[in-house]
Image (tube, grey):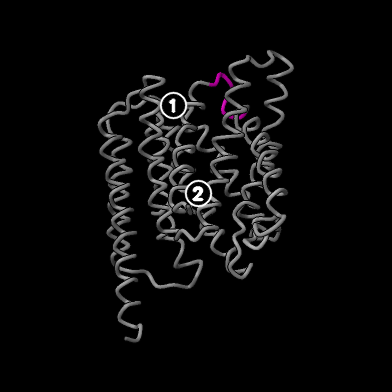
Amino acid sequence: MRRSPLLFALLAAVLFSTGGVGIKQATLTGLELSSARSLVAFVVLLTWTQLIRRGEAEAHGRGLGFNRTTLLAAVAYAATLLFFVQATKWTTAANAIFLQYTAPLYMLVFEPWMYKEKYRGRDFVVVVACLAGMSLFFVGELRADDVRGNIAALASGVSFALFSLLLRRNLTEQNGTDGDLSAVIYGNLLLGVMCAPWLVARIMSDGLVVSDVFIVLYLGTIQIGLAYTFYAAALARGARSLDVGIVGYTEAVLNPLLVLIVVGERPTLFAILGGACIVTAVIAHALYNSHRNSRRTAELSPD
């Protein structure tokens, strides 16, 4: 029986959400963990890509491609990973994931500029709602780590938005083929190599504890490698980007919940309210646009 493509999107979101626990549990620094996790993910995704290039999968464009847009997307993706790991190390998992998911806010701002499209009045309502949610993360007593963690999380949202926008351009340049895995593979390689000096220094001085080895293998193989396999499968089987994006917000809910259960880290009330504000605004906007587009299509279609 053929499974719904959104099931693959949900599986990807669930696996992505486990990253917070792994990052919190690892004794490696953010730079050391970023290198190790991305190098493992690079090997896993490269192997997967080479295997699926044979047969029908190649028709979906999941083989390795390279152009200027892919390179820029890879840089944006690497920045997203690095900023998110650092944010999760410095502040709460809830702050890190919710502030990363402000990415649609930046997409609303930059997308019309990048693609010569008009700004829409309703988009500004979402922008204001997201800004209000973001401001709640900076209310109350904050440690220095919370401030820099929140800033790193916001930076991860900006880079994630740029990554998504560049993927759209890549999609256009490749005549509809899905080039996201190429950017992800190159991005992991870039981050793994850039942060390798810190990882090598750690291995040479103190070595790696067994728990860190297992955490790195899990994060690279499952939390990134297998998760992106499911993500690509959802797109390849016809899932709309909108639907995949909405299902992806499962990660924003599960990530801090899993950290609460496993690590015992409790998000603040302001973080919960801010996250709810951001998630509600973005999902409502996406659903409204989907309904509006469907109605317009129905009106234009002949009876």
Which amino acid type is marked by label 2?
A: Phe
Is 226 situated left or right of 56 in this image? left
Sequence-wise, the earlier of marks 1 and 2 is 1
Quarter that holds the C terminus? bottom left
| Relative to 172, residue 82 above or below | above
Q: Position of residue 92 (x, y in %)?
A: 40, 28
Residue at 71%, 14% in the rendered image: 205
Q: Nearer the viewer, residue 259 or 128?
A: 259
For mark 1, give the secondary structure. helix
Residue at 59%, 60% in the rendered image: 178
User: Mark 1–mark 2 contact, CB under 8 Å?
Assistant: no
Q: Residue furthest front?
A: 1
Is 191 situated left or right of 17 in this image? right
Among the 4 quarters of the image, the one containing residue 135: top left
| Relative to 116, residue 168 above or below | above
Instruction: Decide whether residue 218 is among the magenta residues.
Output: no
Among the 4 quarters of the image, the one containing residue 242: bottom left
Q: Residues within 10 Å of mark 2 (few under 14, many from 20)?
A: many
Can you identify the residue that label 2 sits on?
160
Q: Position of residue 287 (x, y in %)?
A: 31, 60
| Relative to 187, residue 87 above or below | above
Is 269 situated left or right of 294 in this image? left
Which amino acid type is marked by label 1?
A: Asp
Q: Which portion, as a residue range, is magenta?
A: 26-31
Q: Which mark is residue 145?
A: 1
